[in-house]
Structure formats: C-alpha cells, structure tokens
Image (cartoon, rainbow, N blue to C red):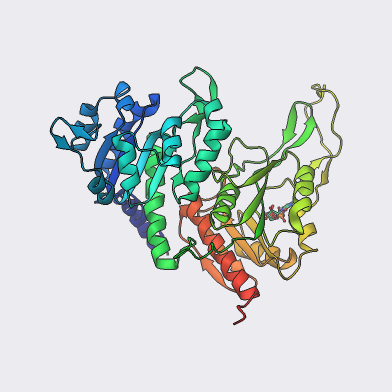
C-alpha cells in the first residue's frame, strides 16, 4: 500500500513536470511594467517542453525587447502587422496555439479585447485565435477596481476566457494593493491546471455548455461558507484557526462558472473569489457567519459549508486590552458557538443539496460519516491532515466524497480548483437524481 502510494506520488510529480511537453503556447505581451516578467514565463514554459511563440504590442517594447523574448523562445517575435515587405500572418498564429496567454494584460489591452478593437498585431492575433484564452491582468489597484475594468473583465469571462487572479503587493506607482500580475510560477501552475482540467473534462464530461445549451447550474442559487472565523477575546486578540479559505473560494468560483448565482459568506482572509459574479459577504465571527448564511439559506438550492468555523468563543469579551496578570497561567472560559451547518441543515428541504466538510486527524471516515448522518447532508467532503498536500493553506487537496446513498469517491491529490470542479460535478449529479427529467 505504501509502495503504491509512493509510486502514485512519483507518477504525479513526473506527470506534472511533463504537463506542458509539446503544448503550443502563444504569449501575448502588452505594455505594462510586468512585461519584464514575460522573459521568466517564456523560460519556464520552454523548460517544461512547451513550444512558445510571442507576439508583442509596440508599447510592450518599452519594457522588454523583442530580441530577449525571441532568443528565449527561439522564434521571431512579431510586433507589427507588416515588417517592411512582409506580412505577419496573425490568423495562422492564432490557429497554431493550444492556448493563448496574454500576460501581462494591461487595462488598455483588456479594454480592446472586450470591445474587439483591432489596432495592433496582438489584437489581430487575439481576434483570430480559435484556442482557449487565459488572461493575466496587470495594473495599478485603482485601475483594477475601476468599473470600466470590472465591466471589461465580466465581458471577457462571458466570452469563455479565463482570468488568472491578480496578486496583492507593491505596485509600479509605489502603492501597495491588488493589481500585480500573477507571478510567473503561478501562471505556469495555472497552465498545468488548465491542461489538466481539459483532459479531466474530456474524460468526465464537462461543466461547460455544449452547442449553446445552458450551463448545468444556470438559474440556481448557491450559498458557500469559507475561511476561518475569529472570536475576539479583547480589542487586540482573538481565537482562530489556520484556514485560508482557498477550498471554499474555489468551490464558489466553480459553482459560478457552472452558472449558479453564488453568495459566498467568507471569514477573515486576504483572498477573494476570482469569478466576478460571486457576491461576497465578509464576516468575522461564527455568529456573523451564521447570520450571513441564515439570510441566504432558504432561497439557495445548493449549499456548501466549507468554512472552518470556531466551535467555541470566549464567554466574555473584554472591552479593554487584557493586561498580563501576576500568575503564570490564564484560564479562559469558552462557550459553544452555533453549529451553522447543523442548525440550518435541520430546516433543509428535499429540493436543496447540502454539502459539508470534515477535516480530521484520525478516524477520518468514521467522523465524516457521522457528520453526513447527523448534519442531514447529501454529501460530505472528507480530508485528512495526515495526507501530504491536503488541508490548510495548500493549493492542492486530497479528498474523499461520501454521499448519503453510500457512494464513495476517493480522489487523488489535485489542485483545489480541480477538486472544486469535481465537487460541483457531484452536486450536479445529485440535483439530477433529485429532480428526474420529465419527458
Ligand atoms: N460547521 C459549521 N458551524 C460550526 C462548526 C462546523 O457550519 N460551528 C460546519 C463546517 O463548515 C463543516 C462541518 O460543519 O462543513 C464540519 O465541521 P468540523 O469542524 O469538521 O466538525 P464539527 O461538527 O465542528 O465537529 P468536530 O470539530 O468535533 O470534529
């Protein structure tokens, strides 16, 4: 068993390294200071065996030279539609690629893409591309939050393009905030996920619409809880846990991508949902999370409670900062918080699909099945802190799904976004079983 596990891990690692072998990647570089990172992106892609061609906008050349990217990619880098006597065939470039990655995508390029403007070679290539398009935006925080940029992103997502989350950090303006382009390593990881999802989708049936048919959760309302809660002790201290919220956020994004109208009740975390249609209610305590969830529970057909809610909170919250006493110990009196899943689960109807999580360190299956039964769930997602790469803060997870019919799906280690898609597929299955088609 141990040898089998080691072999699987080794196989996954090798498979991950080879994930981009032979993939044709067309990199579009637009004018942003983050363009200098295009060199690293090309290097990492080539190192993983991908074939890379690069197209640049004229203003990108202010930040990095075509010669640098041509040398690294081993292909000429066209910038203009014609060079002296020859014409750069944007149509064939767009058709050549398995994926077109636009990184960095400046606010200007996003706007042109959303509106189909075609005033440079990058735009002509983009408009000719028949492959999936991934966008890694880069701009200052205020530009990123501007309603025009938000609207452009929404439009681009409606074209079926994928947007990589921007990162938080120091910006070209010297300010600190959201808008930095995803780091090259994260972009490569995203490409792994993209190609992995493509192969999973082709094996397992996709969540994407086929020939204009509606998305599987179109018109359904969903409620997701995610992240930790913080229970204050005094104005400067609190009790909490290590949850980052990544798994629940990935589920909210996957439900939204499947067409659901999602409300995400999110505990304190620096992360946010990437899908622009996810409505996020930020909360701090278990009590706030209960109220935020209760307000949306009855009208939701899909409910996924992935939050790591504190089970206890300090019975008394000091108004002023507690001072160190003379003694060596401090005894805190804690009281139980409301179990949100159990309390709201007691009021659920047969039309709702209710999903809970079970993170354990021992007797995992026994405890997970107990939660499935006692919290009135359709599905419990079990993960164990004993599995490497699973649990808090990782970008990967290893889960087993137990449904109330006795079905068990043990999934291998995957990225959290893939796990989220598997969970959403299972939810879609349960919904179909609950509401058989009337012909
Ligand atoms: N949960 C909740 N409200 C709480 C505690 C847990 O909604 N106050 C939900 C979690 O979001 C998760 C499930 O219940 O979906 C299981 O949470 P977990 O903490 O693993 O289990 P508990 O029921 O709290 O039991 P224990 O901590 O003893 O394992």
- Relative placement, left or right, of 33 versus 405 is left
What quarter of the picture does the N terminus occupy? bottom left
Q: Residue at x 32, y 32 (%)?
A: 38
Where's residue 219, x and y in %?
A: 63, 60
- Relative placement, left or right, of 75 versus 119 is left
Q: Residue at x 78, y 43 (%)?
A: 288
Q: Answer above or below: position of 353 versus 320.
A: below
| Residue 215 visible in the shown view | yes
Q: Furthest residue to the bottom?
A: 439
What quarter of the picture does the C terminus occupy? bottom right
Where's residue 380, x and y in %?
A: 63, 63
- Relative placement, left or right, of 229 versus 196 is right
Where's residue 98, x and y in %?
A: 30, 51
Q: Residue at x 39, y 24 (%)?
A: 33
Which of the two residues, 391 or 103, is positioned nearer the viewer here?
103
Which of the two residues, 166 or 110, is positioned nearer the viewer here?
110
Q: How many marks?
A: 0
Q: Answer above or below: position of 330 versus 244.
A: above
| Residue 395 visible in the shown view | no
Q: Answer above or below: position of 226 versus 314.
A: below
Q: Answer above or below: position of 321 versus 228.
A: above
């Amino acid at each position: 068993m141990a040898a089998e596990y080691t072999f699987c891990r080794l196989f996954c690692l090798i498979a991950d390294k080879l994930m981009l072998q032979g993939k044709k990647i067309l990199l579009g570089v637009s004018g942003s200071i983050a363009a200098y990172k295009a060199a690293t992106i090309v290097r990492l892609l080539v190192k993983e065996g991908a074939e890379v061609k690069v197209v640049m906008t004229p203003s990108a050349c202010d930040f990095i030279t075509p010669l640098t990217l041509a040398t690294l990619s081993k292909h000429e880098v066209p910038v203009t539609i014609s060079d002296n006597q020859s014409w750069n065939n944007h149509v064939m470039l767009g058709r050549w690629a398995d994926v077109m990655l636009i990184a960095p995508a400046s606010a200007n390029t996003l706007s042109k893409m959303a509106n189909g403007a075609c005033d440079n070679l990058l735009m002509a290539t983009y408009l000719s591309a028949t492959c999936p398009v991934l966008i890694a935006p880069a701009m200052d925080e205020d530009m990123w939050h501007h309603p025009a940029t938000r609207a452009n992103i929404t439009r681009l997502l409606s074209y079926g393009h994928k947007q990589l989350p921007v990162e938080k950090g120091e910006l070209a303006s010297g300010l600190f905030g959201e808008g930095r382009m995803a780091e090259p390593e994260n972009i490569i990881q995203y490409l792994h996920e993209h190609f992995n999802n493509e192969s999973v989708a082709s094996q397992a049936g996709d969540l994407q619409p086929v020939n204009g048919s509606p998305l599987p959760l179109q018109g359904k309302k969903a409620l997701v809880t995610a992240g930790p809660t913080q229970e204050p002790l005094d104005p400067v201290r609190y009790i909490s846990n290590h949850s980052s919220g990544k798994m629940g956020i990935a589920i909210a994004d996957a439900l939204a991508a499947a067409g659901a109208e999602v409300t995400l009740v999110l505990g304190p975390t620096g992360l946010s949902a990437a899908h622009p249609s996810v409505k996020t209610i930020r909360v701090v305590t278990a009590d706030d999370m209960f109220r935020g969830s209760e307000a949306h529970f009855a009208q939701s057909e899909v409910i996924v409670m992935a939050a790591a809610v504190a089970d206890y909170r300090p019975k008394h919250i000091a108004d002023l900062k507690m001072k160190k006493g003379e003694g060596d110990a401090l005894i805190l009196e804690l009281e139980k918080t409301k179990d949100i899943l159990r309390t709201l689960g007691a009021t659920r109807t047969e039309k709702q699909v209710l999903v809970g999580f079970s993170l354990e360190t021992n007797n995992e299956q026994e405890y997970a099945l107990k939660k499935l039964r006692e919290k009135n769930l359709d599905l419990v997602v079990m993960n164990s802190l004993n599995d490497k790469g699973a649990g808090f803060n990782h970008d990967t997870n290893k889960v087993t799904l137990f449904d109330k019919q006795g079905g068990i799906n043990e999934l291998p280690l995957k990225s959290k976004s893939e796990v989220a898609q598997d969970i959403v597929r299972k939810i879609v299955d349960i919904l179909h079983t609950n509401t058989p088609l009337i012909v």
